[in-house]
Amino acid sequence: MSPEDTSDTPSQKAVNQQVPQNEDDISPIQTPGARSKSPWKMPRKAWVQVLKRTWVMAGFHNLNLLAAGVAFFTFLSITPLIAATVMIYGLVGDVETVQRQMAGLTDVLPADASTLIEEQLVSVVTTNASVTGFALAVALFFAVYGGMRAANGLVSALNVINEEHETRNIIQVTLRAASLTLAAIGIAIVGVSSGSLFAWLQTQSTDLIGPVAQFFVKLLTWIFAILLASTGFATIMRFGPDRATAQWRWLMPGALLATFLFIGISFGFSLYVAYVSDYNATYGSLSAIVVFLMWLFLSAYCILIGALINAEAERQTVQDSTTGPEQPLGERGAVMADTTLIEGHKLSMHQKRLRRKADKAARKAT
């Protein structure tokens, strides 16, 4: 075995990896979904293979450690992120309103985590209520800079999942992290603003129409929240890793999965903390911090699982999943888009076809 073989990932060992020069060189006998131009058009067998590889690669990439790292850096960034959100919203609205609305958004969180965030909200609003002008700009700059640690941690984790090495210089990485941080703040502000709107609609519908309309307003609120969160996750997965950007349709399956996992795990963990586990007995005064860190860890794991699903879905097809003019395999600027998987027992047949094609071309040339 050559030294290069020892660095193969499990998915490369499980199904021998071959990189033809053109999609037309792919054998008609190949992995399911190899010709799919969209993840939504891949057959069920293809998704079974994607899920199996996701399970294997989650262990290979140590996804739990990656999620723990992202959770830690997010924990360090949470106060600056809240401060930046409150200050930006305060430029066009009432900071007291954003405090109430953001406190309402924490209803899905475990009680201890919700309390911790609400305390930070009160502290931020109290501290920044009188900050204006140049002082506000300076405070906002440092708040965004402090919040970038979460973005940097997530970018590093996404590079690992996409099997990419960071080649951007420190200025490019910093600007990318700042952009993702500002995008996250913008999404939070949209969520807060829409929360106010939907709360008003719910009140009006109850007074004018009745409980049926109230139910539909709540349903509309959840649909909008899911779309907003999915868009945010897809944006992070698209612009975070150091690779050619993937098309939106190849990002949405993982983004939607991450959103539903995030909602389900948040509710489930809230119930677990409330009725099953007694963190106060174990950690005492640190219980709120421990619960919050656990929730951040589970949330980060949801996002990374979604990103891993997208990566393995890209690996399943020979079609170009990146933006811009269509490129052949090996020239797309992304490891997952530049490789395809051909099942081991079919690989020898495929290689013979390639050799026959090359011999035929050589005879024609002579």
Image (cartoon, helix red, strand yellow):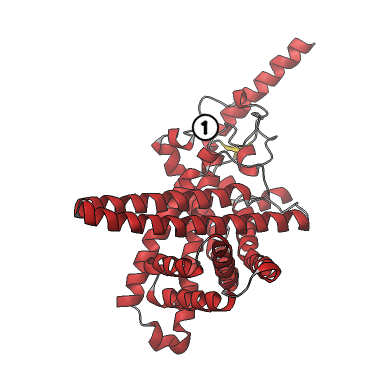
Compared to 246, does 266 lie above or below? below
Q: Is residue 69 visible?
A: no
For disc 1, the neighbor class at 10 Å (few under 14, some 14 to 19, many from 20) is many
Position of residue 89 measured from the top left corner of the image (x, y, whole percent) = 54, 62
Q: Is residue 268 visible?
A: yes
- Work out which quarter of the rendered image holds the C terminus and state it: top right
Position of residue 325 measured from the top left corner of the image (x, y, whole percent) = 66, 29
Q: Is residue 4 left or right of residue 183?
A: right
Position of residue 305 measured from the top left corner of the image (x, y, whole percent) = 49, 55
Looking at the picture, tell me which residue is in the foreground, 150 or 133: 133
Q: Is residue 200 left or right of residue 168?
A: left
Q: Is residue 230 left or right of residue 91?
A: left
Question: Looking at the rendering, which quadrant does residue 265 occupy?
Answer: bottom left
Identify the residue at horizontal 55%, vertical 40% (top origin): 314
Residue projecting furthest to the right: 366
Identify the residue at horizontal 46%, vertical 33% (top origin): 32
Identify the residue at horizontal 34%, vertical 57% (top origin): 200
Q: How many marks?
A: 1
Q: Amino acid at mark 1?
A: Ala
Compared to 245, does 229 lie above or below? below
**Element under disc 1:** loop
Compared to 316, does 93 lie above or below? below
Position of residue 88 measured from the top left corner of the image (x, y, whole percent) = 58, 62
The residue wearing badge 1 is 34
